[in-house]
Amino acid sequence: MNQKKISGDVYSPSQQVIDKAHVKDWNKLNNSAFENYLDFWEKEANELHWFKKWDKVLDDSNKPFFKWFTNAEVNIVYNCLDRHCETPRRNKLALLWEGEKGEFRGFSYFALKRETCRTANVLKSLGVKKGDRVTIYMGRIPELLISMLACARIGAIHSVVYGGFTVEALHERLEDSQSKVLIVADGSYQRGKIVPLKSIADEALQRAATVESVLVVKRTGEPINMEPGRDMWLHELLALPIANSTCSIEIMDAEDPLFMLYTSGTTGKPKAILHTHGGYMVGTYSTLKYVFDIHDEDRYWCAADPGWITGHSYIVYGPLLNGATSFMYEGAPTFPYPNRWWQMIEKYGINILYTAPTAIRGLMRFGEAWPNRHDLSSLRLLGSVGEPINPEAWKWYHRVIGKDKCPIMDTWWQTETGMFMITPMPCVDLKPGSATRPFPGIEMDILNEQGESVKPNEVGNLVIKTPWPSIMRTIYNDPDRFVQQYWSKYPGMYLTGDSARRDEDGYIWVIGRVDDVIKVSGYRLGTAEVESALVSHPAVAEAAAIGLPHDIKGNAIYTYVILKSSVVKHDKLIEELRQHVSHELGPIAKPEHIEFVESLPKTRSGKIMRRVLRARALGEELKDLSTLEE
Ligand code: PRX
């Protein structure tokens, strides 16, 4: 028996799916993990390789700065590559890759290790050492994964900047991380066009002083500027004897940093979330194994971008830790036609597809004929992440792509959590639109402003009560902000920043962010970042950004701009401002709508009241204006 009878619109998995699953009885696993979650994580950790095992599974003596697997010695890359190379998996495909133009590359575990070692040796020859930061800025190409793994192999901390970000976003991240080396591609392909990554980087580098060396990956072959003494072609260095195919692995403390990844928060600049070699490894390994039910024969495709946490955890580390065969595609889902994804699922025999609601909604609007032209029978499981999935999109995905036989793993988690936190497993009954219940061993709650648990179906703040191994360790360079932002509203509990409700069956329904984070097509942006990009334009005096509902993107960015008094409004100014945001931050941040206003609603202390702007834009009644200045 899978679980007690639950109510509502319920989709139960077939016996076939349950028979194959690692976990056939969710309640049993959940109960045992709850009895002692440390035992649960210790057992998971014991499935991986450690140079030296831990003294303690969890050290919570300095909350909220938790430490996991204290004094253990490990390197995540050993578990991603070397461990498999000692078994017959050595010759198994680790990575299958298709470029937007249709070219194919494949890497066995042996080949991926070899290429990682070669790039690691190049980094070492540039003087990169344990603890140094390296920024990586590319499209979805194998060199992105290889660069990440090469850094981690020698103990350097990678900071990947999403290839859809542009000048100021890259500059800020280079400067905050104090990166010594930047690895960048000359360009990337998106919808048949070239994104000039290297020239964007050149502009960012003029604003950032710390970078000593730039390694350039040749992807497009378009002419680019190469700065003598700073810029080097990676392929030229890889041809030198220094780039040999063995590279000793750095032995890391379990708590040593693995990477930092910038994400948007409530105020100000993006913050660097820090993850470690030990705990992050255990969390991503275990969650992917159970939730996407990885078996040796599977071909798994996470269609996210490695520049975001989903890619870090579930394109790069999770699949390699599990010895899976992962597929990665460079380009846009609809290029050259809206059947591109379905064509590749058929061509490579993909068994598991993990994507975002925005992509599903985007593909849905082209109709069923496109997927129906392809044989999608290899699919066994589907996944969703990044924002709440509306039941209509869920049902389309289930029926048209999954042919009513593939359960959908709607996984709720965050850059900060590193791993799935609320998620079903294949054996669980599903309700479209709910990510179901917390992963075994994780206790979550929904609280009102007074810190009390709300009643079933009441909305409140989603919090996490138990520590988990892949929890962020801190904000790089800003531990106070880490404590203040996540641990101060409800003492001892992690504040997610999301609102949610829990139904009578204990199923959680995430509603969305309660802070100033906007999710545009699943990408996380801060209102403050969009506002500062606008204000950096000479015509703008002040700006306010909000997110409003959008059919495909989930949220779209609406902005209100006060122009400087000397500026004369003209027809092209709106487009000029939109282009400016795109140039500074990235095309994903381009405002959908810009309205010129004379003033902005503010509190007496001068904070913009975005909820007033939102209510006005949606034509809603304005509630509680007591704090409004005027
Ligand atoms: O609001 C939640 C939403 O995405 C936020 C985290 O964004 P990010 O750090 O970029 O990570 C995204 C990928 C893990 C959350 O606070 N979110 C993520 N997954 C879901 C979701 N909202 C509803 N359902 C989900 N499955």
Image (cartoon, grey):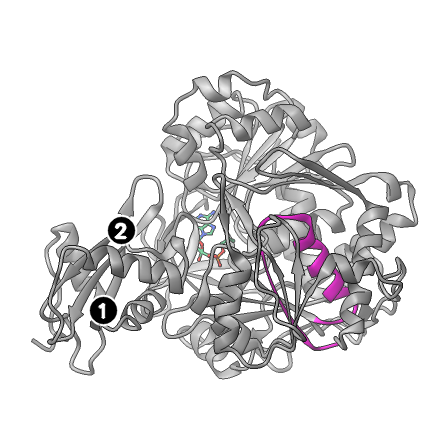
Side (left or right) of 154 relative to 510: right
User: Would you say residue 490 sits in the magenta stretch?
Assistant: no
Q: Residue at x 59, y 53 (%)?
A: 306
**Looking at the rendering, in which quadrant would you find the N terminus?**
top right
Dot 2 corresponds to which residue?
592
Q: Residue at x 11, y 51 (%)?
A: 619
Q: Is residue 48 above or below residue 543?
A: above
Asked if the residue at tag 1 contacts the one at tag 2, i.e. Cβ–Cβ closer than 8 Å, the answer is: no
- Residue 219, position as x, y percentages in the image: 63, 49
Could you tell me the amino acid type at mark 2? Glu
Going from N to C along the chain, the mark reached first, 2 or 1, is 1
Using the rendered image of the protein, determine whether residue 500 is visible from the camera's viewpoint.
Answer: no
Please tell me in which quadrant of the rendered image residue 388 appears.
Answer: top left
Could you tell me the amino acid type at mark 1? Ala
Q: Which residues are magenta?
A: 129-156
Q: Is residue 622 above or below residue 406?
A: below
Please tell me in which quadrant of the rendered image residue 92 appears.
Answer: top right
Dot 1 corresponds to which residue?
543
Using the rendered image of the protein, determine whether residue 166 is visible from the camera's viewpoint.
Answer: yes
User: Would you say residue 148 sits in the magenta stretch?
Assistant: yes
Q: Residue at x 87, y 40 (%)?
A: 91
